[in-house]
Image: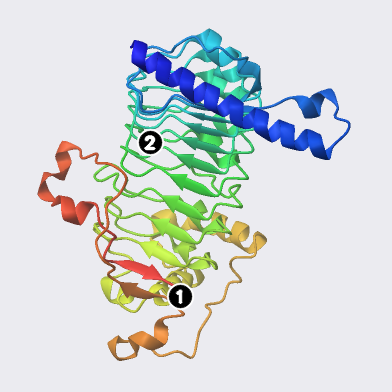
């Protein structure tokens, strides 16, 4: 432990010396500086030291802009330490043994990036909603069973939300109010459903709810109102049909559906590529293809689709031919592809997965479509 503290102190001294050299160089160029300009912000790196407790820092925590405590054996982070990080912008505590975050995290009003992945956290403190500057929240590979109910009402600057490989059963309704969100990764959970009103996510480009396996059976119609959506991954769930509104996703370039017992659209449509799928769904919406039991719900959505400019009541025909003989001509309209296998960050495999091989589960889906 004495060696670890000396190592930490050496890092701190090196960082301070670098900052002093930089300040000295700047003083040559400027004759006057205000008190704000003289203030230096520090980067403190305690990562990879196998720390079980944190040493008492010898510097003013109020001038720390980035604190890296990752890859240690920390079980708790002192409330008092977090409360003094008044100017921290990046906080990285991934790959520790944390079971909770201190409530004082709500004091970090300037925090933009928070990485708590690879811990044992079961819930996020409600005070995290006070981190209103937060843009990137990574809580992958924890034990999360729920997110704070009102998180979407408060973290309005959030652009990336990663909560994959947890035990989430649902996403709070307030998620649909994250109007600046661009990436939502909720794969490898136990999601039963998605919030109904997703149309407020006007900047969402990537939605990944894959590998919720036997739990996720349907997608809300509001998926068709995600005007900026480019990539949709719903692979390895229990979805039998796609909502007709999928046909209105004009910017959609990649659709991954492998590992679902899909009936609608039929497989022969998928074999013709993404453009054929979107046209098929548009035709169903135009012709009222849903069962009588769901017609009233569907008709209520058509008006909203028209309002958002994604549906004009007519199927968009093209002059391109389809079929196996013209696969290369469909490369710009979307076609099925089977890329090489690739892994994801880490492994999480419920007991239900025994019927699948790991290579198949953690690879790019076969029934994928790309533009």
Q: Is residue 128 above or below residue 190?
A: above
State the mark number for residue 172: none
User: Which residue lies at the image location 42% right of the left edge and 57% below the top edge?
Assistant: 232
Q: Is residue 343 left or right of residue 37?
A: left
Which label lies toward us, 1 or 2? Answer: 2
**Image position, residue 112 (x, y; %):** 60, 34
User: Which residue lies at the image location 45% right of the left edge and 75% below the top edge?
Assistant: 279
User: Which residue lies at the image location 13% right of the left edge and 52% below the top edge?
Assistant: 357
Q: Is residue 28 above or below residue 363?
A: above
**Image position, residue 300 (x, y; %):** 56, 55
| Helix, strand or loop status at disc 1 | helix
Residue bearing mark 1: 279
Are circles 1 and 2 on residues that touch, CB within 8 Å?
Answer: no
**Image position, residue 343 (x, y; %):** 27, 52
Task: Measure the alpha-carbon separation of dots 1 and 2.
Answer: 36 Å
Q: Are there few (<14), some (14-19), or many (20+) residues within 10 Å of tag 2? A: many
The one of 52 and 358 positioned closer to us in this rendering:
52
Quadrant of image for the C terminus? bottom left
Quadrant of image for the N terminus? top left
Residue bearing mark 2: 140
Name the outermost residue toward the right.
32
Q: Is residue 348 left or right of residue 315?
A: left
Q: Does any portion of residue 132 appear in the rendered image?
A: no
**Image position, residue 177 (x, y; %):** 60, 39
Question: Within the image, what quadrant is residue 108 found in?
Answer: top right
User: Which residue lies at the image location 58% right of the left edge and 67% below the top edge?
Assistant: 311
- The disc, 1 or 2, on the residue closer to the chain's N-terminal end is 2
Q: Does any portion of residue 275 appear in the rendered image?
A: yes
Q: Is residue 121 above or below residue 205?
A: above
| Helix, strand or loop status at disc 2 | loop
């Amino acid at each position: 432990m004495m060696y670890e503290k000396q190592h930490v102190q050496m890092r701190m001294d090196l960082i301070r010396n670098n900052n002093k050299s930089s300040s000295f160089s700047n003083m040559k160029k400027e004759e006057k500086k205000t008190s704000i300009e003289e203030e230096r912000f520090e980067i403190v790196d305690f990562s990879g030291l196998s720390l079980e407790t944190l040493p008492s820092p010898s510097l003013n925590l109020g001038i720390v802009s980035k604190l890296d405590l990752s890859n240690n054996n920390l079980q708790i982070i002192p409330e008092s330490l977090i409360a003094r990080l008044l100017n921290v912008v990046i906080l990285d505590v991934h790959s520790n043994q944390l079971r909770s975050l201190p409530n004082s995290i709500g004091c970090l009003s300037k925090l933009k990036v928070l990485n708590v992945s690879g811990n044992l956290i079961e819930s996020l403190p409600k005070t995290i909603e006070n981190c209103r500057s937060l843009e990137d929240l990574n809580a992958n590979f924890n034990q999360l069973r729920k997110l704070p109910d009102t998180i979407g009402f408060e973290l309005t600057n959030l652009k990336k939300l990663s909560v994959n490989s947890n035990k989430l059963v649902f996403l709070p309704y307030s998620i649909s109010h994250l109007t600046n969100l661009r990436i939502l990764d909720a794969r490898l959970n136990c999601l039963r459903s998605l919030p109904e009103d997703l149309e407020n996510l006007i900047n969402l480009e990537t939605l990944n709810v894959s590998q919720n396996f036997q739990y996720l059976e349907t997608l809300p119609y509001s998926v068709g109102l995600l005007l900026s959506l480019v990539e949709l991954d719903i692979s390895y769930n229990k979805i039998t049909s796609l909502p007709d509104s999928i046909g209105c996703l004009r910017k959609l370039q990649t659709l991954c559906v492998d590992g679902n017992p899909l009936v609608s659209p039929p497989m022969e449509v998928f074999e013709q590529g993404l453009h054929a799928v979107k046209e098929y769904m548009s035709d169903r919406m135009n012709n009222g293809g849903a069962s009588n039991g769901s017609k009233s719900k569907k008709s209520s959505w058509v008006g909203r689709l028209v309002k958002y400019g994604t549906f004009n009541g007519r199927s968009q025909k093209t002059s391109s031919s389809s079929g196996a003989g013209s696969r290369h001509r469909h490369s710009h309209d979307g076609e099925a592809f089977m890329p090489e296998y690739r892994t994801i960050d880490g492994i999480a495999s419920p007991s239900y997965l025994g019927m699948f091989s790991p290579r198949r589960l953690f690879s790019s889906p076969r029934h994928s479509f790309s533009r």
